[in-house]
């Protein structure tokens, strides 16, 4: 059985409001993910490319062994992916200055520009949507998003009680 966009997996403990929020957020996130991936596709970037580029962008250069761990593969598969990304000018490999046996993967200027352009397009899209809201709705949304962010911080810290 296939699920529609409005069906969510629930624990049976959600209130009607929580369920409605989950439904709305699910639809919003799926729609925005689709828009983001459309922009990535227009730049001929695969999901694997995007994933690795985002990780490198966020955390800096990483060893090939970490790349393999992130994509859940062996070193030969990771090397093949990085080879293709390197051929396209998205990443480069350098030896670690402290340990020449370690090969670090980092973004090239083009790879960093691609990530920046995708993030900028997402930000512009969000801005355009937010600007359609009234000042009052923007304030209510800001309060709700701040509360949600705090709840996620609690979850991330292992505290399930927001």
Image: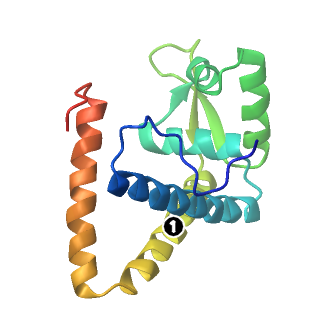
Q: Is residue 104 above or below residue 40?
A: above
Image quadrant assignment for residue 118: bottom right
Please give the count of numbered marks on the rendered protein. 1
Q: Quadrant of residue 44?
A: bottom right
For the C terminus, the quadrant is top left
Look at the picture and state if 45 lies above or below 56.
below
Q: Is residue 127 above or below residue 46?
A: below
- Residue lying at 49% horizontally and 45% vertically, measured from the top left: 57
Task: Say which quadrant the N terminus sits in.
Answer: top right
Task: Tell me: 1 left or right of 51.
Answer: right
Question: Left or right: where does residue 20 sit relative to residue 110?
Answer: left
Res 4 → quadrant: bottom right
Which of 44 and 62 lies nearest the eye of the viewer?
Answer: 44
92 is higher (above) or lower (below) than 79: below
Residue 26, how many percent across, how many down? 51, 55
Q: Residue at x 22, y 57 (%)?
A: 146
Q: Depth check: give the residue in front, 9 or 101.
A: 9
How packed mark 1 is, by other alpha carbons closer than 10 Å (few <14, some 14-19, many 20 or more), is some
Q: Relative to residue 10, is residue 87 drawn left or right?
A: right
Tell which of 5 and 109 is nearer to you.
Answer: 5
Instruction: Name the secondary structure under disc 1.
Output: helix
Question: In the image shown, does 7 or 147 lie closer to the viewer?
Answer: 7
Which residue is at 59% across, 19% downward? 69
Residue 89 image offset from top left, x and y in percent: 71, 49
Residue identified by numbered label 1: 122
Colour scheme of the rendered structure: rainbow
Residue 51: % across, % down = 60, 41
Q: Position of residue 139 (x, y in %)?
A: 21, 75
Q: Which residue is drawn at the image coordinates 60% and 38% (left, top)?
A: 52
């Amino acid at each position: 059985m296939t699920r529609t966009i409005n069906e969510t997996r629930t624990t049976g403990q959600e209130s009607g409001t929580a369920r409605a929020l989950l439904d709305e957020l699910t639809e919003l996130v799926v729609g925005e993910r689709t828009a983001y991936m459309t922009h990535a596709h227009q730049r001929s970037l695969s999901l694997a490319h995007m994933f690795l580029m985002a990780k490198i962008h966020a955390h800096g250069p990483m060893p090939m062994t970490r790349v393999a761990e992130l994509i859940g593969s062996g070193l030969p598969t990771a090397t093949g992916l990085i080879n293709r990304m390197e051929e396209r000018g998205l990443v480069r490999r350098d030896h670690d200055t402290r340990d020449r046996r370690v090969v670090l993967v980092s973004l090239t200027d083009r790879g960093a520009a691609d990530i920046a352009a995708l993030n900028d397009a997402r930000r512009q899209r969000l801005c355009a949507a937010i600007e359609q809201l009234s000042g009052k709705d923007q304030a209510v949304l800001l309060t709700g998003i701040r509360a949600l962010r705090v709840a996620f911080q609690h979850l991330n810290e292992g505290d399930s009680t927001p």
